């Protein structure tokens, strides 16, 4: 009269990266960072050597890291976790560096122009 326990097969759901929305957003950010790199409107103007390219490079690298993170098959991997924190650290560092160095060079240029003129 005892019933045998019923065995239920578990369905294995394989995650293939992040959601489609996050993947699409990552591709959008890569495209926007490329447009930002060629745009004359920047946090630090491209006419300032090194500093002008710093923000462009920072945003391109950050967007690429985000895309790699979103397209990784295993979202629980150590690589994805490292990329997650590294990209935000890079965003903050890029903005701070571009603003500080760009502002410093602009201020120095204005000081020289004021002293000469």
Image (cartoon, rainbow, N blue to C red):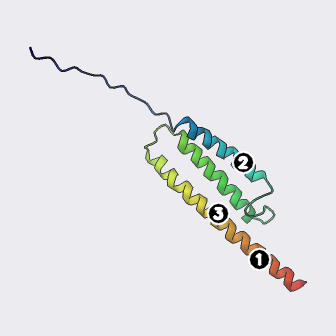
The image position of residue 87, as x and y in percent, is 56, 54
Q: Give the image location of residue 58, x and y in percent.
A: 65, 57
In the picture, the quarter occupied by the C terminus is: bottom right
Q: In which quarter of the image is residue 71?
A: top right
Q: Which of pointers 3 and 1 lies earlier in the amino acid sequence?
A: 3
Spatial separation of the CA atoms under disc 2 and disc 3? 17 Å
> According to the image, label 3 marks what residue?
95
Q: Residues under labels 1 and 2: Cα distance? A: 28 Å
Q: Is mark 3 on a helix, strand or loop?
A: helix
Q: In this view, does 104 lie above or below 55?
A: below
The local secondary structure at tag 2 comes to helix
Sequence-first disc among 2 and 3 = 2
Q: Which of marks 1 and 2 is nearer the N terminus?
A: 2
Looking at the rendered structure, the secondary structure element under dot 1 is: helix
- Residues packed near mark 2 inside 10 Å, few (<14), some (14 to 19) or many (20 plus): some
From the top left corner, tell me how far across and down residue 90 is, in percent.
58, 59
Instruction: Specify the label residue 107 is tagged with.
Output: 1
Q: Nearer the viewer, residue 1 or 39?
A: 1
Q: Mark 2 = which residue? A: 34
Label 3, label 1: how far apart the Cα atoms are: 18 Å
Residue farthest along the bottom direction in this orientation: 115
In-front residue for pair 32/56: 32
């Amino acid at each position: 009269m005892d019933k045998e326990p019923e065995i239920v097969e578990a369905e294995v759901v394989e995650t293939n990266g992040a959601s489609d929305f996050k993947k699409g957003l990552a591709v959008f950010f890569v495209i926007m960072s490329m447009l930002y790199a060629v745009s004359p409107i920047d946090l630090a103007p491209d006419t300032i050597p090194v500093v002008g390219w710093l923000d462009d490079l920072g945003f391109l690298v950050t967007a690429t890291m985000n895309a790699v993170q979103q397209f990784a098959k295993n979202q629980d991997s150590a690589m994805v976790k490292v990329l997650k924190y590294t990209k935000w650290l890079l965003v903050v560092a890029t903005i701070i560096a571009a603003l500080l160095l760009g502002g410093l060079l602009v201020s120095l240029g204005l000081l020289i122009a004021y002293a000469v003129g």
